[in-house]
Amino acid sequence: MNSEKAIVALLDALNDLSLDYMIVGSLSSNFYGIARSTKDADVVISLAYSSVAELARRLDSEFQFDPQVELELVTSTTKYLFSFREAPFEVEVFLLSDDPHDRERFLRRQRATLLGRNAFFPTAEDVIVMKLRWALSRPHGKDVEDVAAVIAVSGDNLDWQYVFHWCDLHGTRKLLDSI
């Protein structure tokens, strides 16, 4: 699959460059929940633009880099877009923001294996918290479905007090309770 080839190239580059990162978005909810197809990968890195430029140089043969900065609205962080040259698959690279939950979930990230490569993911709890935040600004339903899938698979092992704490702070507790 082209998406798997793109993800492997991305993970190899992130790991070869020794960047501090975590895989977020649908790949992280797939990891803890029920897999669904996706046309993109989302990554948070903890360093500055120089790391993004270094990543762009490393991925140049596989990805087209768009140096135009975009703003992600939920955590007010900057993001950069990489388009896979072989197929319609994109990677959004977000710089770690100053948002308290963004910082906390980055500190709690865990090492795992994805497609035979080392990868870093937020915890299942942090996937739920972030997907709920995104669901408020993206009403298309996939984020809610992802939260339900993570709860269905991981619910008995979750630190619910941690999830409730952040949901209460973000105003997403009612949405969580409805799921």
Image (cartoon, rainbow, N blue to C red):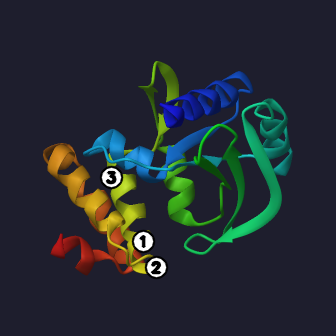
Answer yes or no: do the residues labelled 1 and 2 have beta carbons within 8 Å? yes
**Residue 55 relative to residue 164: left or right:** right
Badge 1 marks a residue whose secondary structure is: helix
Callout 2: few (<14), some (14-19), or many (20+) C-alpha neighbours within 10 Å? few
Sooner in the amino-acid sequence: mark 2 or mark 3? 3
Which sits in the foreground, 12 or 165? 12
Which sits in the foreground, 70 or 176? 70
Q: How many marks?
A: 3
Residue matched to label 3: 125
Sooner in the amino-acid sequence: mark 3 or mark 1? 3
The amino acid sitting under disc 3 is Glu
Question: What is the spatial separation of the Cα atoms under label 3 and label 1, in whole angstroms?
Answer: 13 Å
Callout 3: few (<14), some (14-19), or many (20+) C-alpha neighbours within 10 Å? many
Residue matched to label 1: 133
**Residue 53 relative to residue 139: left or right:** right
Badge 3 marks a residue whose secondary structure is: helix
Q: Which corner quadrant holds the C terminus?
A: bottom left
The amino acid sitting under disc 2 is Ser
Which sits in the foreground, 87 or 56? 87
Residue matched to label 2: 137
Where is residue 33 drawn, in percent x and y?
A: 26, 45
Question: What is the spatial separation of the Cα atoms under label 2 and label 3, in whole angstroms?
Answer: 20 Å
Question: What is the spatial separation of the Cα atoms under label 1 and label 2, in whole angstroms?
Answer: 7 Å
What residue lies at 34% left-to-right and 64% top-to-bottom? 142
Picture quadrant where residue 19 is located: top right
